[in-house]
Image: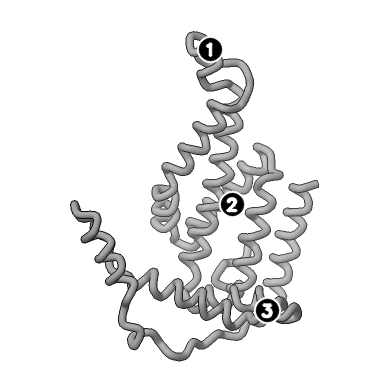
Amino acid sequence: MASTASLQPSTRIAIWIMLAISLYGMQLVGLALLSCGIAGLVLVTGSARAVWRGLFRARILLLAMFLIYAFTTPGDSVWLSAGRFGPSLNGIQNGAVQAWRLAIMLASLAIMLASCSREALLSGIFHLIKPLSLFGIDPERIAVRIWLTFYYAENMPPFKISKNIFDTLSQRLADASMDVSAVPQEIEIEANRLGTIDWGVLLATFSLMCWSLW
């Protein structure tokens, strides 16, 4: 498997998008094999902390997805005393699989973000949306807005909850009015030239997506 460091940022983003699409067509065997591949990438890239942090932040979402499927999917009730208000066996199975798929998607996203700098990520996004210029959409404007979003997200002061809601709102308004003079006036976007490895990995991922959705 090619190291992620040898792949262009646009290739990594395209792979993640195709992977996210193909996840919902994969069955248990495919999910298990993909999980092993993700685990291997974590070891190769050394992104275990980033993956764990991403999954930990999404723990409520994962649990909520599992519970929604467990309690809303028709089927044989696990708790007979609860009747139709209890979780069903089919719901538990479906909820576990859906949460598994989401966890794989989040883990792969964490690996990609950990292996890409902010500038590289912006460059990849820009080259992916560049064909939109054929439809009159300015990709540079979109790229600049995405860059500013990254910049303000990284430089925003930590949020502190106050007992007084008006103090909290005032704090957020003050945070939103950051000194614009500190924002860089020029943004450089690196050129992305896809090599043989990029095209090969993209073709393999596209084939995997078609196979999983077949």
Question: Which residue corresponds to mark 1?
Answer: 83
Inspect the image, locate mark 1, and give the three-letter code of the amino acid beneath it.
Answer: Gly
Image position, residue 24 (x, y; %): 67, 45
Residue at coordinates 69% horizontally, 65% vertically from top-left?
Answer: 201
Q: Where is residue 173, by image quadrant? A: bottom left
**Helix, strand or loop for disc 2:** helix
Residue 137 image label? 3
Question: Which residue corresponds to mark 2?
Answer: 37
Where is 2 relative to 193, above or below? above
Point out the tag, 1 or 2, that comes first from the N-terminus.
2
Where is 84 relative to 172, above or below? above
Residue at the farthest left position: 163
Q: Is residue 145 left or right of residue 49?
A: right
Q: Nearer the viewer, residue 63 or 52?
A: 63
Residue at the farthest top position: 81
**Helix, strand or loop for disc 3:** loop
Image position, residue 189 (x, y; %): 55, 85
Of circles 1 and 2, the one toward us is 1
**Helix, strand or loop for disc 1:** helix
